[in-house]
Amino acid sequence: MRGVFESSEVRSFSIRFCNLLDLLQLLSLCIQRKMRIFQIYVEKTSSLHNTYPTFVQHEAGSKAHHKIPGGIMLKIVLGLLCLVSTARAAEGDVIVRLESGSDRSFRSQLTNADQVEALIPELNLYLIRPAAVRSSMSLMRTLRASPGTQNVFADYEMKLRNIPNDVDYAKMWSLNGRSKVNISAEQAWAISTGGENSAGDQIVVAVVDGGFDTNHADLIPNLWINKNEVAGNGVDDDGNGYVDDIFGWNAFNNSGKLNSDLHGTHVAGTVGAKGNNQLGIMGINWDAHLMLVSASSGSFSIVSKGYGYVLKMKKLWIETNGQKGANVVATNSSFGVDEADCQSSTYSVWNDIYNEMGKMGILSVAATANNAVDVDKVGDVPTGCNSPFIVAVTNTDSSDRIYPRAAWGLNTVDLGAPGTDIYSTLPSQSYGPNTGTSMATPHVAGAIGLMYAAASADHIAATHADPAAAALLTKKILLSSTDANATLAGKTVTGGRLNLGKAVVTIQRYENKSTQE
């Protein structure tokens, strides 16, 4: 295994606030659009300096109308401090704020077909829906030139700052952005928390490791389930050649009963522990589908059987148009053979395996060695293999530096990711820190899963049309989104450390230019 336990320091974090203009724009949108309403509880405020609001979100779909007495207007503005806007405009609508007494001049610029609604009369804040015959841009130009107009802008949508309520989030320095490292996880979660893409395809990450605690409360909700198999009946119900493979496969004993193991449980939690459930931790994907494969071993035959199961399930998913199998987009392999030559006759078959999985659209994320060595010179399996479908990962710490006992390779190791004192799930409903390239790798495997969940319509279409090409495109986006890091420069392909937010934003905005010409 490529991980060792070390102590972890609990880190605190603080809340960031928006500016006043954002608040005013947000408040207008909450009233006009009837967004999900937030119930705001404000502590006693003998002075503004002692005001600390807290928030509880209502269930999705609930609606409410609130009158806003002038005396609590400021408190409500303060209570909205934890919301952040997105840049996407609400189609066609315009917001205007007027100077006092300029209502008549403003109305003279409108036609009878323009719809006007007062948002906050006390602030002279209005919403305008332009008549169909003229554009919002034209209306904004007219209003900006009008006397008495203080501010004019296109209406836009808001999103909540997607911070999970898992009780140990403060201990997760690699995700909460409160250390010197910020992989922009919260930015990514504002777009997607994983599980499915916009076409409804399940996104599955296969964790190939020693074993897993399948009864852990933070993992159970996110385990992939073979819907075509009946548990415990001793029959291969889906005809895939594997009996009772409910959560995955155990290559050690050729059964669907998985081993329990500390290392694999920790790795699986980083990829996809359930998020926002007021329990323990969350993974890179809050809503993952984790396929569990017990197969990491000193025996190549065991490892190959594990990979063979993953390959079989992805091929079946493609052949049946999603009716059987699993849409595996990445494997996590936190194991390997130190100082081995992947080009030799003994190990070259590893390349063949990764290439074959790559044809099905599977990226293989692999941990490099936990030794301060140059893989380019001494070799490593699998991170020294040359399959283009491998993503090789080394370990960085909370100071954003490569870990002293982590390997590197300018031509072989693609990027760094947090892998030091990583807090995650452990067997028997527990949690704890672990260190190693084994812990860095699931950050990247999880990132690939989240990228596929957040992908644009063009990327989804590319995935369906050519899974292998789409996998390589995804890898390209991932690697081009890293943050430059001086300790990784000259030691990794990218010279950078994972930035989850950049990768997710980029793939969400991906457009296939060839289809638009």
Image (cartoon, grey):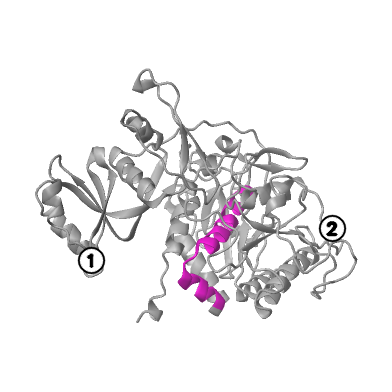
Q: What residue type is labelled 2?
A: Lys
> Residue placed at 57% from the left, 75% from the top?
467
- The first of marks 1 and 2 along the sequence is 1
In the rendered image, the vertical position of residue 299 relative to residue 221, given as above or below: below
> Residue placed at 25% from the left, 48% from the top?
126
Q: Main secondary structure of the magenta part?
A: helix
Q: Position of residue 299 (x, y in %)?
A: 80, 61
Which is more toward the observer, 146 or 197?
146
Q: What residue did someone put label 2 on?
A: 257
Which is more toward the observer, 363 or 74?
74
Q: What residue type is labelled 1?
A: Ser
Place residue 208 in its image quadrant: bottom right
Q: In this view, does 498 lie to the left or right of 360?
A: left
- Residue 373 in sight in this render: no
Residue 9 is covered by the magenta coloring: no
Q: What residue did someone put label 1 on?
A: 135
